[in-house]
Image: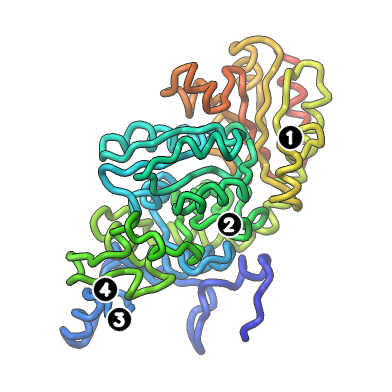
Amino acid sequence: MEKKMKQATLCVQAGWKPKNGESRVLPIYQSTTFKYDNTEEMADLFDLKKSGYFYTRLQNPTNDAVAQKIAELEGGVAAMLTSSGQAANFYAIFNICEAGDHIVTSNEIYGGTYNLFGVTLKKLGIDCTFINQDASEEEIDKAFRPNTKALFGETISNPGCRILDIEKFANIAHRHGVPLIVDNTFPTPINCRPFEWGADIVTHSTTKYMDGHATQVGGCIVDSGNFDWDAHADKFPGLCTPDESYHGLTYTKAFGKMAYVTKLTAQLMRDLGSIPSPHNAFLLNLGLETLHLRMQRHCDNAQRVAEFLQSDSRVAWVHYSGLEADDCHALAQKYMPNGTCGVIAFGLKGDRDTAIRFMDSLQLIAIVTHVADARSCVLHPASHTHRQLSDEQLREAGIAPDLIRMSVGIEDADDILDDIKQALDKI
């Protein structure tokens, strides 16, 4: 039996296994297409009878090596890269839902995902019910319908920094015969592995910590291989009944634990085409090689910043689960005992203009739309990422008008704190 490598080793070594004389570093296969010597080989690839490469929209060696690395980090059986985190969440749902179906999701999710589920999916005939993730199992049960196909949540919510009770959500999902899909972007598999707590499918915006340097936009979907689709075949006909676009092939019968990701690749990516470029996958892989080192530094720095903000009289509140007084501290200790991430949510005493004056006074910490890379940055969600939501929707999503989202980078913590102090002095 092959020795199971630790996370730090997987970050560096997983995915690409060079053979004798091959490139030590993962190459960029910057090609749209791949050559074969006869038509039968190509036909077998199109019929999914053999695995191999023929067109980069479906599969590419660079992309697949990086997807394999992320799958190993998460402890899954397979993964597929997408062109963005938004595409990953859309594909993860659309792979098992169609018009007339329904999903249940926590309301503590990224604003773009909230809009995707609450507005755009409805245009495709897929309904969505938002629930309070801190509600009891009995209360959440009430949101399920006979046509519900998935339960969704974020391990650490963006931007509210709430911790998902993964085990509770998994129990609820499985009681209703549906998979739990978890967006694990903020903690990454370095700090949280949702499959170990019952989640079935994990998504990522690889744009964030996995890349870590704000150089590429990307996403990933990882399947645990644990959900028994055939046990609920009536709910998931796309996986458990013949696909006429592949000569009547049934994914669960033909591919077993690989059914979900095979359908993602062969059907959704074939038809919708949200692929990352091989060059973007190459850049992502460079980030993954230092992910284990950076996450520790992000968490250490964020802890110092959160403790300072908590002690400053000009700060109204701080939400960071590394603080013992935080109401998510116990959940964080359970699911992420080695740290959560570098993102802090807090509010200043005053009004919305107070928050704006503070942010405009920062010098080292930049105001950007991005979050979770090496450089410290800050955002006011009510004015920026979530501005499409009404005040009522903002409150439902756990976003107060004064909420400031600070992504603490890997610079020297003293320099980060000095910048925060001088900006507070100017409000």
Q: Residues within 10 Å of mark 2 (few under 14, many from 20)?
A: many
Q: Nearer the viewer, residue 137 or 72?
A: 137
Point out the tag, 1 or 3, that comes first from the N-terminus: 3
Q: CA distance from mark 1 to mark 3?
A: 53 Å
Identify which residue, 270 or 278, lies in the foreground: 270
Q: Which dot, 2 or 3, sits closer to the camera? A: 2
Q: Residues within 10 Å of mark 4 (few under 14, many from 20)?
A: some
**Image point (49%, 79%), residue name:** 23
Residue 2 sits in which quadrant? bottom right
Q: Amino acid at mark 2?
A: Gly
Q: Amino acid at mark 3?
A: Lys
Image: 65 above or below 132: below
- The circle on residue 198 is 2
Q: CA distance from mark 2 to mark 3?
A: 32 Å
Secondary structure type for disc 1: helix
What SS does tag 2 mark?
loop
Q: Which residue is at 67% across, 59% downward?
A: 292
Mark 2 or 1, closer to the camera: 2
